[in-house]
Image (spheres, coloured by chain):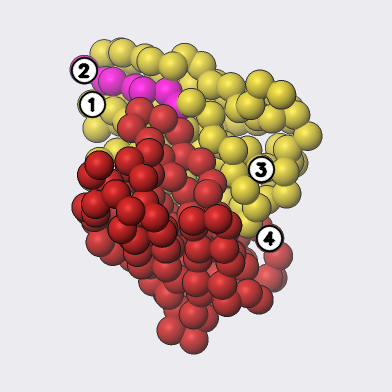
């Protein structure tokens, strides 16, 4: 298996623009997680899905952030409009059985908003 | 919600020495405690985990201990090597009110471990 796949790997955009991050989880995994990592705030869970259903989105910063999982093999995290404080590394992870089993992280997307 | 505190924030040791990283958590319902290693510019990867029905778990040079009464758990690395240099994160999974596995994982702030040759 190729592991968790994320795209793009790097994204540079201007404030106010829409940003869409994409993730393909490991086949057969039923849980998918979106994390944000910054020096100041560490590794934060934004949202996680179980069997394509959002279970906990309490970590989503504000209405500018939205996430979808239309099927078991694809998820998106969208920021609209983007702001400089959104600059971070965004990781997608998947797990075969839920949050209390090993989570396999993707390579991350480094987002820079200027 | 769950709060996970991790100490120290940085740790510097000589090759061959032992390293210990400690974490405390706030929610007594938490029942899963993984440790992740993140090398510079790379993704976090699980190195060891422990569940609340076990007090200690060991895997070669790495061990984790759990004290549920005190709500703390620790990572022990023996015979450290330069390739152990990385950021280490502890985490705790809080079960939801129904006690199912739908609880989310809360990470500590990380410990930067540097092993000097």
Residue at mark 1 to residue at mark 4: CA–CA distance: 35 Å
In the image, the chain rendered in red is B
- Residue B85 visible, this angle: yes
Q: Residue at x 69, y 30 (%)?
A: A26
Say few, some or many: other residues with alpha carbon within 10 Å of mark 4 (under 14 / 14 to 19 / 20 or more). Answer: some
Residue behind mark 1 = A84
Q: Residues within 10 Å of mark 1 (few under 14, many from 20)?
A: some
Distance between the alpha carbons at the discs numbered 1 and 2 = 6 Å
Q: Calculate the distance from the C-alpha at mark 2 to the C-alpha at mark 3.
A: 33 Å
Residue extent of the magenta highlight:
A108-114
| Same chain? Circles 4 and 2 | no
Q: Position of residue B49 (x, y in %)?
A: 57, 58
| Label disc, if present, on residue A30 of the rendered structure | none
| Same subunit: marks 1 and 4 | no
Q: Does residue A79 sit above or below B34 in this rendering? A: above
Label disc, if present, on residue B101 of the rendered structure: 4
């Amino acid at each position: 298996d190729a592991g968790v796949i994320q795209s793009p790997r790097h994204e540079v955009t201007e404030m106010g623009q829409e940003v869409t991050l994409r993730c393909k989880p490991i086949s057969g995994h039923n849980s998918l997680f979106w994390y944000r990592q910054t020096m100041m705030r560490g590794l934060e869970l934004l949202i996680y899905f179980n069997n394509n259903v959002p279970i906990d989105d309490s970590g989503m910063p504000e209405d500018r952030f939205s996430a979808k999982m239309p099927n078991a093999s694809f998820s998106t995290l969208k920021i609209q409009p983007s702001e400089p404080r959104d600059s971070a590394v965004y990781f997608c992870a998947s797990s075969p059985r839920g949050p209390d089993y090993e989570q396999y992280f993707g390579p991350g997307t480094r987002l820079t908003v200027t | 919600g769950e709060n996970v505190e991790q100490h120290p924030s940085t740790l510097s040791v000589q090759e061959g020495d032992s390293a210990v990283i400690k974490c405390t958590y706030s929610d007594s319902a938490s029942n899963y405690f993984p440790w992740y290693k993140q090398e510079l510019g790379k993704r976090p990867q699980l190195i060891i985990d422990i569940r609340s029905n076990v007090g200690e778990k060991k895997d070669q040079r790495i061990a984790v201990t759990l004290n549920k009464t005190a709500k703390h758990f620790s990572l022990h690395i023996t015979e450290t090597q330069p390739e152990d240099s990385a950021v280490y994160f502890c985490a705790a999974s809080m079960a939801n009110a129904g006690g199912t596995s739908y609880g989310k994982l809360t990470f500590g702030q990380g410990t930067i471990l540097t092993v000097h040759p």
